Amino acid sequence: MRRAAVCLALLLCLLWTGAQGEDGGGTGKKEGEFDIQGAHDQSSSQTQMRTDIWAELKKLRDMAIEHRIKIQRLEQDNTATQVRLTASESKNAVLETKMSSSEKEVEEVKRENAAFESRMSSSEKEVEEVKRENADLLARVTASEKKSTAFESRMSSSEKEVEELQRENADRPQVAFSAGLTNAGAVGPFTTATTLKFSKVFTNIGQAYNPTTGIFTAPVRGVYYFRFNAWETRLTWTSIELFHNDKRIMVISDLHDGTGHVSASSAMVLQLEKGDVVYIVMPSSFGVYDDVFNRIIFSGFLLFPQ
C-alpha cells in the first residue's frame, strides 16, 4: 500500500511538471513567437512521457490489483484464522471446562483413594487381628485335638478294660441269694439244735442256696458276704448261729423280758473253697418268730472268685 501511494505521488509530480512546460515556462520565447521545431520536440517528449506514465500507471494498477487480491486473500486467511482461533478458543474453553471437571474428578478420586486407603488400612488391621485370632484358635484346636487324641486313647484303654471286665464277669460265676424263714409265726424251741430252712426264696442267682435243706454251697473258690438276723415276740431267749462247714463261726442272741419284741443281726465275710457250706442253726431251747412281714432274712453273695 505504501509503494502504491508513493507511485501516485510521483505521477502527480510528473503531471504538474508537464503542465508547466505547456505554459512556456523555461523556453526563453516571447509571447506570440512560434518555434516549429521546438513545438514538435516538445510534443514528442510529452507523448513519450504520457506513454511512460500510462505504462507506469498500468503497472501500478496491476500492482494495486495484485496487492488488493493478496490483501483479500490475507483477509480471507485472517478470517479463516480468526474462525479457527475462535473455534480453538471455544475448544480451549471446553477443554478448560473439561480440565476443571477432570481436576475436580481427580480431587474426588484422590479423596476416595484416601478414604479407600484408610479403609484398606483398617481392613488390613482387621485381617491381622483375624489372623491372630485364627492362630490362637488353631493353637487351641491343636491342643484340643491332642487332648482329644489322649482322651480317645484313654477311652480306648478304658473300653478295653471294660471289655476285659465284661469278659471276666461273663466268665466269672454270678452267685447271690436272699431268703425269708417262714410265714408260720413261732419256730421252736426244739430239744436239739436245728438247721433253719429259709423257705421263702427271694433271690437265688446261681442256685447255690438250697431252700429244702437251708444250706448254701459255694460253687467256686472265693470271698463271700453273708448277713442274717433273729427276731422274737415271746418272753424267752432267742439265738441263732452261723456255721461254716461243721464249724460254728458266729452266735447272736437276746432275751425278751417285757412287752414288744427283740431282734439281733450280724454279717460276715468268709473265704470259701469250692463245695464249702454255710448255714444257720438254732440251738435247743431257743425260739424265733417270722411271718408274712419277713422279719428273719438269710442273705449272701460272691464278692469275687479266687
Image: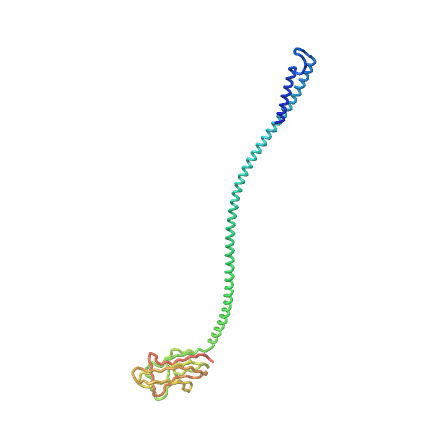
Left or right placement of residue 117 versus residue 42 in this view = left
Percent of width and height locating residue 177: 40, 79
| Position in image of residue 263 (x %, y %) | 34, 82
Q: Quadrant location of the N terminus?
A: top right
- Of 157 and 80, the residue lying toward us: 80
x then y, percent, for residue 245: 42, 86
Q: Position of residue 25 (x, y in %)?
A: 65, 16
Compared with 40, 280 (above or below) is: below
Q: Residue furthest top?
A: 32
- Residue nearest the viewer, comparing 97 with 17: 17
Tell me how the rendering is colored: rainbow
Outermost right residue: 37
Q: Nearer the viewer, residue 127 or 262?
A: 127
Q: Residue 264's quadrant in the figure? A: bottom left
Whether residue 269 sits left or right of residue 95 in the image: it is left
Height in image: 3 above or below 229?
A: above
The answer to which of 80 and 296 lies nearer the viewer is: 80
Extreme residue toward the bottom, this view: 191
Left or right, residue 217 beside residue 12: left
